[in-house]
Structures are given as C-alpha cells and as structure tokens.
C-alpha cells in the first residue's frame, strides 16, 4: 500500500515544539511532522474558558498549545487521553486549527501519563482505545492514527499486539506507528524504556505482512537514513525521533532518497539557521525569547573543527533576554564563511 508519509518525525515532549518542527521542515519538505502530546482534557478546560471573562487568557493558552507556522504542513496533532467524548472534542479543535491529521498516544510509559490513564497503559484496554478512535473519526474527516508499543509488561506476545491492532483498526484507525519495543510501566523511566527493552522489528514486519491492508510505520532504533531505507522494504513508513533531534542534518537527503524528490538542494547548517530568521523575527515581535528557537540549533553543526566554539557562542548570545534575530544572522554568516 502506497503511503504519502514514508518518513516522519516522532512526537517528543520538550523537543517537537513549533521551533524544532520548523527547523525540520527546512531539512525535509516532505516528511510528516507531529506536535508534542496535547492532553485532551486540558483542551476541554481551556475551551470552556473561551466564553468566560478569561477568554483572552484562554485563547493565548490555546495558541501556545496548538499554534504552528503554515510552513510546517503536513503536520499531525498528537493527543493524550482515554475519554472518547473529550478526545472527539479535541480532534474537532485540532481540525479547526488546521492540522492535517490526529494521532492518539498509546505509547508513552511515563508515570505521570499513566496516572492520567492514557499512554502505553491503554494497550491493556484495546476496546477502550477503539471507542476513542471511533469517536475521533466520527468527529472529524481528518485521518486518525495511533502510536503505540509492541506490548507492555507481561502483555507482550505477538497475539496481544495483533489483537490490539485489529481491535483498534475496527474502530477506524487508518495508520499505526509501532514503537518496536515493549514498555515496562514499572521499574523503568521513559528514557530507559527507549533503550532497555529489546528491539523487535521482526514483530512489526510480521504485523505488516499479516495485515497488508493497514498502513504500518516502524519506530524505534532507526539511527540513520540507510537503515530507514532498508526497513521500507518491510513496512509502509519509518518514524524517527531522538536521532532526528540529535542529528537533524543527517536527514537532509530523505526527500531525494525516500520521497524521490530532488527538486531542492539538501539543507546545510547555514541554510537552516538563516531559514529560521523570519520565524525568529515574528516570534520576537510577539514577545518570545530567542533562546526558545536557538536551543534546537546546537546540533546542526557537529563533527567539524570549531563546532563546539560555534555552539558556545550561539548559546551565550541567544541566552540573553533581549537577543534578537541578529544573533542568528551572525551565526549563519559564520557558517557560510566556512562553507557549512
């Protein structure tokens, strides 16, 4: 089955904010980007305040949670929750804000998320997830997708995975992004859950082979473009998280290699920094601090002499409260003078 988003950037808390997403859009024009997780109940409470005396404050909070630059398209909104009605409302809000699809988080193992009864713990309740997806698909014409693990705790057999996917697909999910590690809900923190449970790409390959009518994306352990390319022989798409955040320019060739689109030159460090200047101007004009943008740029230069000095200089300059786009202009010029 052909899949429009054969390469996507995974949702990551404190990473995939609007600034990093725009950075990645400068790296790839074709990949699918995803927001940080937004809790459906929070959107419900904020929306309720829009008709109160606190409407202006509520609107500003919505903008902080949901706002994005039009250049970010295609863009998915990831939601967290376990209540079908609240998730349906949140899906409608996401559609109204202009997102391209809605993704449900059934993969995060953090204790805080578990306490809210959503994230990876919902893999133990596939019928509930199906009801959530059914409500979301009824509320919007946007595709509704699910990001999940291959299992949790002792519910880690292939039969459990297949039952979960079949049940949720019956609720209307159009695509499944499968993190090919199980999650231990007790004993491991989220960072450990990204590395300690063994990778089982074979289970995701089997899932795709046995459910060819579904779109299956592989997530987890994909560290470079060549590995992604090889995995696309087995699945419909690949989703990269930490490797994209830590090494954004490593992926500058994905449009040509994965989407067969060679219509633009591969991004360079200088073109990414310079490309963010208009965004920085707008962000600063609205009262935002430059550091919110610059903190994501420390990884665009690596493995070359002087990289550490460039990062230190950028960090020091952008960390000043009144720092403006001129800091990025100077940083881009330094890179251009070195041919980077």
Image (tube, rainbow, N blue to C red):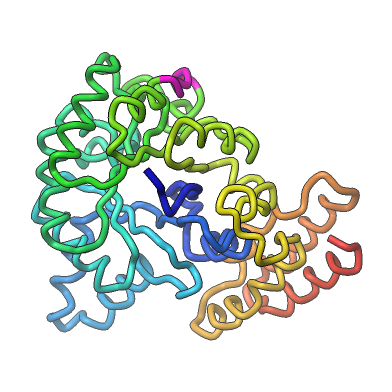
Q: Residue at x 61, y 59 (%)?
A: 261
Compared across the picture, whether 253 is left or right of 142 comes to: right
- 49 falls in the magenta region: no
Q: Residue at x 50, y 48 (%)?
A: 7
Q: Position of residue 206 (x, y in %)?
A: 36, 22
Q: Position of residue 309 (x, y in %)?
A: 84, 55
Quadrant containing the N terminus in the rendered view: top left
Is residue 295 visible to us here?
no
Give whichever of 264, 122 is nearer the camera. 264
Give whichever of 178, 93 is nearer the camera. 178
Q: Residue at x 48, y 41 (%)?
A: 238
Q: Position of residue 241 (x, y in %)?
A: 51, 43
Image quarter of residue 284? bottom right
Compared across the picture, whether 53 is left or right of 318 comes to: left
Q: Position of residue 292 (x, y in %)?
A: 56, 65
Image quarter of residue 324? bottom right
Is residue 319 visible to us here?
yes
Residue bounds of the magenta highlight: 196-202
Secondary structure mostly taken by the magenta-highlighted segment of the chain: loop
């Amino acid at each position: 089955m052909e899949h429009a988003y054969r390469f996507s950037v995974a949702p990551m808390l404190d990473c995939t904010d609007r600034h990093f997403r725009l950075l990645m859009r400068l790296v790839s024009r074709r990949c699918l980007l995803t927001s940080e997780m937004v809790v459906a109940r929070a959107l419900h409470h904020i929306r309720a305040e829009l008709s109160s005396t606190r409407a202006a404050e509520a609107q500003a909070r919505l903008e902080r949670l949901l706002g994005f630059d039009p250049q970010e398209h295609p863009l998915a909104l990831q939601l967290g929750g376990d209540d079908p009605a609240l998730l349906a409302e949140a899906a409608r809000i996401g559609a109204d804000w202009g997102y391209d699809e809605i993704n449900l988080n059934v993969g995060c193992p953090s204790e805080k998320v578990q306490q809210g009864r959503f994230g990876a713990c919902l893999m133990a309740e596939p019928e509930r997830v199906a009801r959530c997806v059914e409500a979301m698909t009824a509320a919007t014409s946007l595709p509704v997708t699910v990001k999940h693990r291959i299992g949790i705790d002792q519910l880690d057999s292939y039969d459990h995975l297949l039952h979960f996917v079949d049940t949720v697909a019956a609720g209307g999910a159009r695509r499944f992004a499968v993190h090919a590690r199980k999650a231990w809900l007790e004993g491991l923190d989220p960072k450990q859950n990204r590395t300690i449970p063994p990778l089982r790409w074979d289970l995701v390959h089997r899932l795709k082979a046995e459910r060819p009518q579904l779109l299956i994306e592989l997530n987890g352990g994909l560290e470079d473009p060549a590995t992604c390319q090889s995995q696309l022989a087995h699945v419909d798409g690949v989703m990269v998280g930490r490797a994209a955040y830590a090494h954004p320019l490593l992926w500058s060739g994905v449009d040509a290699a994965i989407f067969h689109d060679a219509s633009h030159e591969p991004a360079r460090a200088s073109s990414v920094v310079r490309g963010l200047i208009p965004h920085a101007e707008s962000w600063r004009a609205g009262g935002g601090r430059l550091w919110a943008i610059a903190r994501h740029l420390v990884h665009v230069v690596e493995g070359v002499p002087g990289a550490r000095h460039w990062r230190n200089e950028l960090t020091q300059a952008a960390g000043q409260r009144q720092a403006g786009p001129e800091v990025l202009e100077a940083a881009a010029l330094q890179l251009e003078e070195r041919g980077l």
